[in-house]
Image: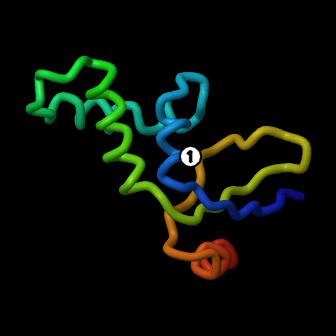
Amino acid sequence: MSRREVFLMSIESLQAYLLDTDSIWYEMYNDDILDAIEGSVDYDLSLHDRMVAATLEVATDMAGWYYWYCMPGCQVDRGPFGPFPNVASAIANGEE
């Protein structure tokens, strides 16, 4: 039987995950990050600095409470549901 896990992703945590090429977040949101970089008009910044700025922009939109389902002792096989503004909203949505 799978169980639901509820967790908070802060802006700082999301930015770290978005920059980590081994994370599930990198795979899910890489296109959003690249779009944000292409939309950047500050060409005085290095590509790395533009990448960091873009991830901060994406992370700001993604921060909040999430939940996902998983089997105990197993990896998650799909992305999280969220973001929700508070833990109660995430739990209520997962119970529907």
In the rendered structure, the answer to whether residue 26 lies left or right of residue 80 reads left
Q: Which class describes the residues within 10 Å of circle 1: few (<14), some (14-19), or many (20+)? A: few
Query: How has the structure been colored for display?
Result: rainbow
**Residue drawn at 42 percent across, 38 percent down:** 29
For image coordinates 61% across by 73% down, the residue present is: 90
Residue drawn at x 37%, y 44% as measured from the top left: 56
Residue at numbered disc 1: 13
Q: Point out residue 78 in the picture as x, y percentages from the top left corner.
A: 63, 44
List x then y, in percent, for residue 68. 68, 57
Secondary structure at badge 1 equals helix
Specify the quadrant of the image occupied by residue 89: bottom right
Quarter occupied by the N terminus: bottom right
Type of residue at label 1? Ser
Q: Residue at x 69, y 41 (%)?
A: 77
Q: Position of residue 15 (x, y in %)?
A: 47, 41
Residue 91: give x, y in percent of width and height: 67, 76
Nearest to the observer: residue 7 or residue 73 = 7
Looking at the figure, which quarter contains the C terminus? bottom right
Q: Nearer the viewer, residue 92 or 22?
A: 22
- Residue 10 vertical position relative to residue 22 in the rendered view, above or below: below
Q: Is residue 50 above or below residue 73?
A: above
Horizontal side of residue 23 vs 5, given as left or right: left
